[in-house]
Image (cartoon, rainbow, N blue to C red):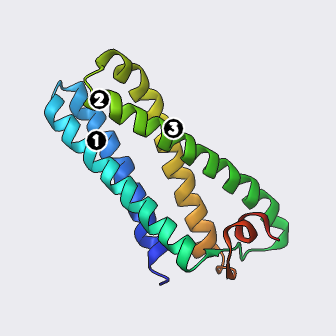
Amino acid sequence: MAILPTISTSCIVISALLVAYGWYLIGRRRTEAHKKVMLTAAAFALLFFIIYMSRTLFIGNTSFGGPETVKVYYTVFLVFHIVLATVGAVFGLVTIWTGLKDQRGRHRRLGPVTSVIWFGSASTGVVVYWLLYVLYPGGETTSLLKAILGF
């Protein structure tokens, strides 16, 4: 199952790229295309979440396998990423809802904020993936709390 983190990270990167393309489309006043692209971006984000949660529940999370001197920085960064991703998901749901309900004023105000948070979340997620699976060998697969907090 070592491929699952790569697949899930790819899903979130695709989601962020689609959000950027959605911005381009709405800038061109292509509302229907914007809607389709943004819903596709949301579908990729949901696919990421399903893969991530399935892996977390059934397999566990990979703890940091890098040097102890880097671990505290990694942990702070990971917590920042988790908070950013959670806030981004909530903002994303509200933004999608306002778009689908044709609450354009609210949607226009939320969209830029949500997108910036989403880009930040996707970027920090890629860095977490890189630190866990590319730069350093992954640590043990363990429970969520142990993987994040180290106990």
Residue at x 22%, y 36% (from the top left corner): 35
User: Residue 96's x, y, as percent?
Assistant: 34, 35
The answer to whether residue 62 is above or below residue 32 is below
Judging by the rendered image, the residue that carries numbered circle 1 is 38
Q: CA distance from mark 1 to mark 2?
A: 10 Å
| Secondary structure state at the residue bearing disc 3 | helix
Left or right: residue 5 versus residue 21 is right
Q: Residue furthest top?
A: 105
Left or right: residue 10 versus residue 67 is left
Q: Give the foreground label among 3 and 2.
A: 2
Residue type indicated by callout 2: Gly
Residue type indicated by callout 1: Met
3 and 1 marks in contact (CB < 8 Å) = no
Please state, as top left, top right, bottom left or bottom right, where the C terminus lies in the image.
bottom right
Q: Which mark is residue 99?
A: 2
Residue type indicated by callout 3: Ile
The answer to whether residue 20 is above or below residue 4 is above
Residue at x 23%, y 43% (from the top left corner): 37
User: Residue 91's x, y, as percent?
Assistant: 47, 35
User: Residue 92's x, y, as percent?
Assistant: 42, 39
Characterize the local packing of mark 2: few (<14), some (14-19) or many (20 or more) Cα atoms within 10 angstroms. some
Judging by the rendered image, the residue that carries numbered circle 3 is 117
Q: Which mark is residue 49?
A: none
Characterize the local packing of mark 3: few (<14), some (14-19) or many (20 or more) Cα atoms within 10 angstroms. many
| Secondary structure state at the residue bearing disc 2 | helix
| Secondary structure state at the residue bearing disc 1 | helix
User: Residue 33's x, y, as percent?
Assistant: 16, 37
